[in-house]
Image (cartoon, rainbow, N blue to C red):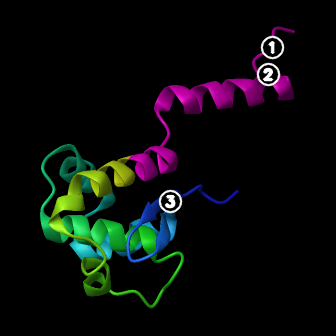
Amino acid sequence: MPIKSIPIQLDKQRHLRFDFNALCALEDELGLPIAKLGNILAGSVGLKDLRAIVWAGLIHEDESLTVKDVGNFFELGEIAEIADKIRQAFEIAFPPEEEGKKKEAGSNQKSGVGKNS
């Protein structure tokens, strides 16, 4: 099942999606493993990092996009809104652990796993 995306208005209506390929591209662009990206997102994000994150979230729609192209899509006054869209897209890509456990428990019950015999 493909990962859902978050609509974002930039140069036109686009959709942020952080699938496996986007995360790998982001690792390459930032030179950081994805585990350290969480630290960046939890703190204050630099402008270059923000631009790279948006770029990685958009390449599923247009692989020809460059990081510089994406930098031309928004202005400084839009950063808070863009950061919120990034947060929403990451929440879809990485649902809270509780939600994942509920889904797993539900599938175990349906398959008979975990039931008392």
C-alpha span from label 2 to label 1: 7 Å
- Residue under the point 35% across and 74% down: 55
Check disc 3 and report the residue beneath it: 7
The image quadrant of residue 99 is top right
Check disc 1 and report the residue beneath it: 115
Q: Amino acid at mark 1?
A: Lys
- Residue under the point 20% across and 66% down: 49
Q: Nearer the viewer, mark 1 or mark 3?
A: 3
Taking the image as shown, residue 49 lies to the left or right of residue 67, namely left
Q: Residue furthest top?
A: 116
Q: Amino acid at mark 2?
A: Gln
Check disc 2 and report the residue beneath it: 109
| Sequence order check, earlier mark of 2 and 3 | 3
Is residue 35 in view from this perspective? no
Q: Amino acid at mark 3?
A: Pro
Helix, strand or loop at label 3? It is: strand
In the displayed structure, 19 sits above or below 88; it is below
Taking the image as shown, residue 76 lies to the left or right of residue 38, namely left
C-alpha span from label 1 to label 3: 41 Å
Badge 3: residue crowd in 10 Å (few <14, some 14–19, many ≥20): some
In the rendered structure, which segment of residues is drawn in magenta?
88-117
Residue 52 placed where, x, y %? 27, 72
The image quadrant of residue 75 is bottom left
| Sequence order check, earlier mark of 2 and 1 | 2
Question: Would you say residue 54 sits in the magenta stretch?
Answer: no
